[in-house]
Image (cartoon, rainbow, N blue to C red):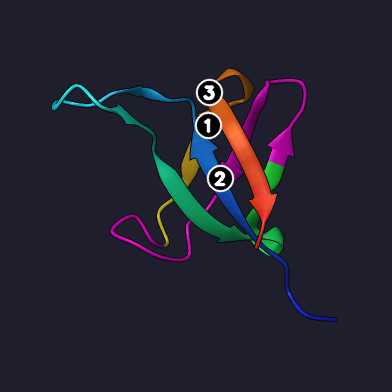
């Protein structure tokens, strides 16, 4: 079975130029850990400038998680 990959997007916010923006990361199902009691998710992005660095994102900041 192939490894599943996901795009995780944060909630939308206003960027410096006044446009709607959001943070986005690509990660794999093998590196996502959900902390139900603490209400956050831990993951390591696979791509981009933050690749390989541990990220913690509270459930309240998650906008979209979708499989690619």
Name the element at disc 1. Answer: strand
Residue drawn at x 34%, y 62% is 48
Q: Are marks 3 and 1 in contact (CB under 8 Å)?
A: yes
Where residue 62 appears, as percent x and y from the top left, is: 57, 29
Image spot of residue 57 (x, y percent): 53, 31
Closest to the camera, between mark 2 and mark 1, is: 2
The numbered dot on residue 8 is 2
Residue at disc 2, secondary structure: strand
Q: Is residue 14 above or below residue 5?
A: above
Cα distance between the residues tagged 2 and 1:
10 Å
Asked whether 35 falls inside the magenta stretch, the response is: yes
Cα gap from disc 2 to disc 3, whole angstroms: 10 Å
Q: Quadrant of residue 52?
A: bottom left
Disc 3, SS: helix
Q: Single out the residue that lies furthest toward the left.
A: 17
Relative vertical location of residue 32 with respect to residue 20 in this rendering, above or below: below
Whole-angstrom CA distance, mark 3 to mark 1, is 7 Å
Q: Where is the N terminus found, in terms of image quarters?
A: bottom right
Residue position marked by numbered label 1 in the rendering: 57
Q: Could you tell me if the residues under marks 2 and 3 are in contact, i.e. CB atoms within 8 Å?
A: no
Closer to the N terminus: mark 2 or mark 1?
A: 2
> Is residue 4 on the magenta stretch?
no
Rendered residue at 40%/54% (across/down): 53
């Amino acid at each position: 079975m192939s490894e599943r990959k996901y795009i995780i997007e944060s909630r939308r916010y206003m960027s410096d130029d006044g446009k709607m923006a959001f943070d986005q990361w690509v990660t794999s199902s093998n590196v996502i850990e959900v902390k139900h009691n603490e209400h956050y998710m831990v993951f390591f992005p696979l791509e981009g400038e933050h690749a390989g660095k541990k990220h913690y994102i509270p459930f309240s900041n998650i906008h979209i998680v979708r499989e690619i």
